[in-house]
Amino acid sequence: GAVVSQHPSWVICKSGTSVKIECRSLDFQATTMFWYRQFPKQSLMLMATSNEGSKATYEQGVEKDKFLINHASLTLSTLTVTSAHPEDSSFYICSARETHEQFFGPGTRLTVL
Amino acid sequence: DAKTTQPTSMDCAEGRAANLPCNHSTISGNEYVYWYRQIHSQGPQYIIHGLKNNETNEMASLIITEDRKSSTLILPHATLRDTAVYYCIVRVSGLDTGRRALTFGSGTRLQVQP
């Protein structure tokens, strides 16, 4: 199947700093990418849908000014957590669409001190 | 997408078949049954999907009842590495649907015991 990578796999940062997470589709072009967040012992929650060349669509309750998404190319989408706080600590997972199937990245664990 | 119901958790002995049930009584005629799993601290992994016929691949088998209101994912010889949360998702498959994100429920936490 298609491969999706994420970088970094984990990151620890201080409160108030910004963190960028990259999501790449390695062997296919993805016009649509999705960002999920997963808190401990909970299921994946969709944060936003990102379409190449256009603004992301955010789910209700997700602050677009805090979670900046850029999908500038068909193989790369980035999620920037701005002014991170401890409550933003979570497992962030991206997913890329190839034709009508979704493939998931390995996830990025963010810890905000 | 139709709602699914799965048991919260299940145990299975290593080497035995793991049978994971899923109820989807409101499934529509054009909706497929998908199964994904998530091993701890990893992204979800696609396992199998089907419409009405039983399906088998190198990972698992999917048995869908004739009325399509329920299905069972079968891992024929479970290993410790199969310990994960298994998600049953029902959705229409197609180009337009692919533009919408998969929605995950709570899934079934399968613990394979040595």
Image (cartoon, rainbow, N blue to C red):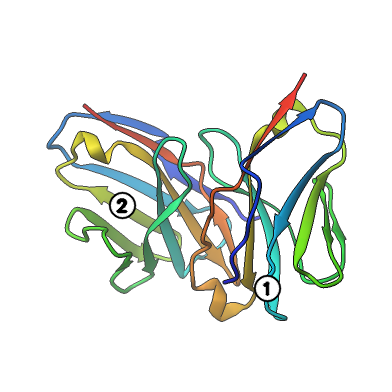
Identified at 49% across, 71% down, the residue is: B100
- Residue A69 at x, y percent in the picture: 29, 59
- Callout 2 amino acid: Leu
Identified at 53% across, 38% down, the residue is: B42
Above or below, A107 against A15 in this view is below
Q: Is residue B88 left or right of residue A111?
A: right
- Callout 1 amino acid: Ile
Of the 4 image quadrants, the one containing the N terminus of chain A is bottom right
Based on the displayed image, in which of its 4 quarters is residue B113 positioned?
A: top right
Mark 2 — residue? A79
In this view, the residue in front, A64 or B66, is B66
In this view, the residue in front, B107 or A2, is B107
Mark 1 — residue? B27
The alpha-carbon separation of the residues under discs 1 and 2 comes to 34 Å
Q: How many marks?
A: 2
Give the SS element for disc 2.
strand
Identified at 64% across, 66% down, the residue is: B90
Based on the displayed image, in which of its 4 quarters is residue B54 positioned?
A: bottom right
Q: Which mark is residue B112?
A: none
Q: What subunit carries mark 2?
A: A
- Residue B103 at x, y percent in the picture: 51, 61
- Residue A26 at x, y percent in the picture: 54, 53
Of the 4 image quadrants, the one containing the C terminus of chain A is top left
